[in-house]
Image (spheres, rainbow, N blue to C red):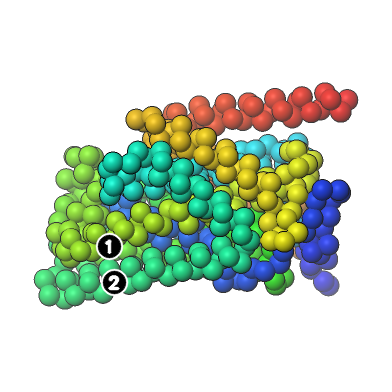
Amino acid sequence: MPSPIASQHVPTSRVDDGPGTGQLHRSLTLGNLVVYGLLFIGPTSTMGTFGVLDARSHGAVALVYLLATVAVAFTAWSYARMSQSIPRAGSVFAYATAGLGRRPGFIAGWMLGLDYLFMPALISLILGIAANRLIGGVPVWVFTAAGIVVMTLLNLAGVKTTATVSFIMLAAEIILLAVFVVAAGVVLAEHGPQRGWLSPLTGSNGFQLAGVLGAASIGVLSFLGFDAIAGFAEEITGSSRQVGRALMVCLSLACALFVIQTYLAALLSPTSPEVLAAHPEQQGTAFYQMLDSQIGTWMGTAVTAVKTIGPVFSAMVAQAAVSRLMFGMARGRTLPRALAHVSARTGTPRNAVIVSAVLTAIIAVAAAIRPDGLELLSSMITVGAMVGFLFLHAAVIGYFLIGHRTEHRARHIAIPVIGGLIIAIVLSQAAHLALVVGAVWLAIGVAMVIAQSRRQA
């Protein structure tokens, strides 16, 4: 008996939802999607959070990322199932609309937009701060705005151009990590570890489950961005299964990179988890201090250089993702139809890219001139993504058990429920400010739905 999923595929190359819309160009391969996902996540993103997780997990920081990967895998499975059945731009908006209805679909897309819209602003601000440290005479907001201009021009050039540039930048980060692994191996061979060989998996002074689970709830956030792959479903050259495969490959590679980095860093770290816990001001720079003291300042300088340039390309992928979300919602008539316009020359949602760039610039520059701008933007991202993931899991249940029959009912209930519970736990750990911002954003979205319903009545 043929799978009911296979029979539901829509040939997305023929999708056309009215005047003003067009088709996105199919030019992305499986490898391109994986590169996009890894670049958005950031192969070196653990360097900034190493100290925090090392302290909270009592040294079992590599185990934290193994558990975080398992936790995120449930969400990746839900993305894979829905992207295979609903291979359209718009990601969670398209999935929730298909599984739950138009109004829940809008709210799902609206909440995920909080993540996708503020993520490039946050990354651009990080770029501005890093560049300002190298060239102190230029204000942070100038570097921030310049970064947004560069990534916008790249996105307007088309997905093949951004894919090529993304590959080059990702290769540079992977080479940097390879150099770190080799250098760390040499130091360990010559001088031995600062902690026990198994301590990154078991803890430096005994295993403490509560600390590891608490750290894993934070470690999950390191994977934010892998889901952006689903937004390019209409631009892949192969079947709709490519998106699901790319998600799983990206997740597996990110897990390997994160575990290897943190395992070696924990072995080499001269500062114990107990000291980091007692002195939280040292947590943010723990990884870099380890590089300086154990490998050499040359390694720290190389990392700083790459992490100054890298955010431009991570923000580029983030901007591409939010433009696809806007495009999908506009085509579904929940955002202005002008955002559904596709450039005939490049096959990109040009208007959506430009609008997202303007919004990103406003948000990022406003944050750049505030002393607490970085903290404020960071708090706005988590809640939107987590609520979007909750809608995703609910959409799987609604789509396969209510709207479309499946031979694997238990699987399509158990996995989304477990994934939803994990996301709910992570959401409960969010900062108070993040929850307040998320609630306000949700209220605005609900108000828009109510207003639209009254206009249609």
Q: What residue type is labelled 1?
A: Ala
Q: Look at the picture and state if 92 lies above or below 372.
A: below
Residue 167 visible, this angle: yes
Q: Position of residue 360 (x, y in %)?
A: 54, 40
Badge 2 marks a residue whose secondary structure is: helix
Q: Position of residue 355 (x, y in %)?
A: 63, 41
Answer with mark 2 or mark 1, whichever residue precedes in sequence.
Answer: 2
User: Who's the residue at 48% across and 62% down the image?
Assistant: 38
Q: Mark 2: give few (<14), some (14-19) or many (20+) Cα within 10 Å.
A: few
Marks 2/1 in contact by CB < 8 Å: the verdict is yes
Q: Look at the picture and state if 12 lies above or below 392.
A: below
The answer to whether residue 44 is left or right of residue 286 is right
Residue 270's image quarter?
bottom left
For label 2, the residue is 179
For label 1, the residue is 302
Q: Mark 1: give few (<14), some (14-19) or many (20+) Cα within 10 Å.
A: few
Badge 1 marks a residue whose secondary structure is: helix
User: Who's the residue at 45% across and 53% down the image?
Assistant: 312
